[in-house]
Image (tube, grey):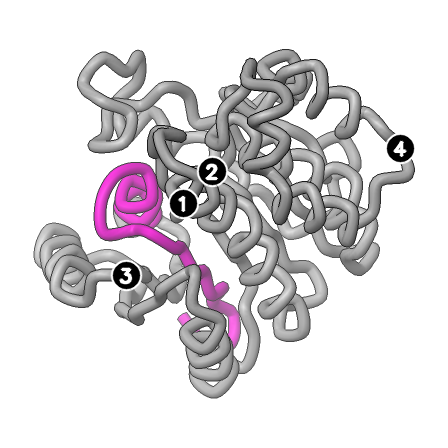
Amino acid sequence: MDKVLRRSILVTGANKGIGYGIVEKLLSGVTPYDIILTSRDVTRGEKAVSTLQSKYPKSPSSLVYYQLEVNDEKSIDTLAAWVQRTFGKLDILVNNAGIAASDSTDESARLVIKTNFSSVAKITEKFLPILSDDGKILQISSQMGALSAQGPTLRKILERNDLTQEGLKKIADNFVELIKIDSSFTSYCGSKALLNKYVRSILSKELKPTQQCYSIHPGWVRTDMGGSGGQYSIDEGADTPVYLINLPFEKNDELNGKFIFKRKVVQW
């Protein structure tokens, strides 16, 4: 198939877990894509690509590796420039990279907020200028980011309709102080709640009329981060993201800006 007709997809944090599962399902499918797998660790990322290429030698899709440290703005800039040079544009951005850590120290709490929200927003903004006119942005979130999972202080803030992107940034910057005020929520829950609010109230309105974005709850998946007690396999966790990727590149107002689980819109 002519490469001009192929869609380019970037998946962050994809050397293992759900990100790896997303890439694998795309490679095993019939739709041809140009897939970019990124990870912080070069050795693990390159090994993931080599393993997948060996497993699916007849895949209609191509797969390449590029290193990305999501918390390093220079690394983000370098990747965005490379994608533009190599593909001319990006059709689908899948922000999958994330961490879960205890709030045992202020530093660990700040790192969770930065990795799961602030850096995701930054990556998104960096790639918007080269996102195709009918492009899609998928943010891998969590049911732990639902409003009902937050403490009353954060819930009240996020329920505001006038909250701006700058307002979300200020919340993220001062999150440790919020935890000390209201200890009924954690940095992980809060980071995903901020991400859901960003998709719903900021990004969905910032995109071009023909572009789309979603926040996705993959389920409690059995991964290194989710643990062995998860309800779903990695393949099951990757199902909804791949479903959204494979949908026609046409604006769907029922899905755009929404929180999605098992291919359906759910209350965030």
Q: Which mark lies nearer to you, 4 or 1?
A: 1
- Please state which amino acid type lies under the numbered disc 1: Glu
Q: Which mark lies nearer to you, 3 or 2?
A: 3
Quadrant location of the N terminus?
bottom left
Q: Which dot marks residue 148?
A: none
Question: CA gap, disc 4 to disc 1?
Answer: 30 Å
Density class for disc 2 (Cα within 10 Å; few <14, some 14-19, many ≥20) is: many
Q: Which residue is mark 1?
A: 107
Earlier-in-chain disc, 3 versus 2 = 3
Residue at left offset 77%, top offset 53%:
166
Residues at discs 4 and 1 in contact (Cβ within 8 Å): no
Residue 178 picture quarter: top right
Left or right: residue 63 compared with residue 139: left
Residue at left offset 23%, top offset 29%:
223
**Which element type, helix, strand or loop, lies under badge 1?**
helix
Q: Which residue is mark 4?
A: 161
Question: CA gap, disc 4 to disc 2?
Answer: 27 Å
- Please state which amino acid type lies under the numbered disc 3: Arg
Q: Can I make out residue 57 in this image?
A: no
**Which element type, helix, strand or loop, lies under badge 4?**
loop
Earlier-in-chain disc, 1 versus 2 = 1
Q: Which residue is mark 3?
A: 40
Q: Which residue is mark 2?
A: 241
Left or right: residue 222 compared with residue 100: left
Earlier-in-chain disc, 3 versus 1 = 3
Earlier-in-chain disc, 4 versus 1 = 1
Q: Which mark lies nearer to you, 1 or 2?
A: 1
223 above or below 139? above
